[in-house]
Amino acid sequence: MSWFQEIAQNPHVDVALLVDEQGNLTATSNPNGENTRHLASMIKAAEVLARGLSAELGRGEMHTLQLSTRTGHLLVMPAGSAHYLIVLTSKSAPLELILTYMQRVIERIPDDPVPARSDEWDVASIIDAVTEWLHNGGDPT
């Protein structure tokens, strides 16, 4: 099992995405979605803003970006030297446990974290699912 599949199979993770530094979706855990480029670009823009704010406030390098909605959370964490791991969870998910788990898994991955079998995922389908999830306020139903 790849590190990405390990995260995707966590019972508290609704969707896991791996985005490269250009904002392109590299891997996804959910085969139901479209708008891949749009969502990946939005997440990349949020990450750039978070990095800029962190630097401007003198708080050091961004470690985790967390966006919370009424019904869920979006977590973004650097993975390797040129990728970002994005995890969507429900509102009731234990965030501290998930963040610690994500960090421990990321510490074990190589500098190029792209999962070996990324051809199994339908990227367009996952983006549709994530876009719908975000439009529904993070509600996984």
Image (tube, rainbow, N blue to C red):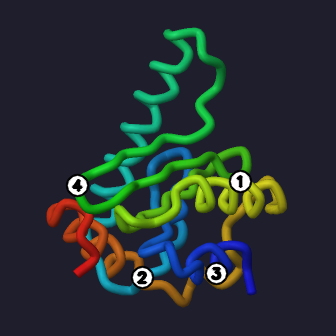
Mark sitting earlier along the chain (2/4) = 2
Tag 2: amino acid: Asn
Residue beneath disc 1: 103
Residue 91 image point, x, y percent:
35, 62
Residue 30: numbered disc:
2
- Residue sitting at x 40%, y 76%: 123
Question: In the rendered image, which quarter is residue 49 located in?
Answer: top left
Few, some or many C-alpha atoms within 10 Å of disc 3 (few <14, some 14-19, many ≥20)? some
User: Is the residue under label 1 in contact with that under label 4 (CB below 8 Å)?
Assistant: no
Residue 37 image point, x, y percent:
33, 59
Residue beneath disc 3: 5
- Residue sitting at x 66%, y 84%: 117
Residue beneath disc 4: 70
Element at label 1: helix
User: Is the residue under label 3 in contact with that under label 1 (CB below 8 Å)?
Assistant: no
Query: How many labels sit on residues?
Result: 4
Is residue 127 shown above or below 104? below
Question: In the rendered image, which quarter is residue 85 located in?
Answer: bottom right
Tag 4: amino acid: Arg
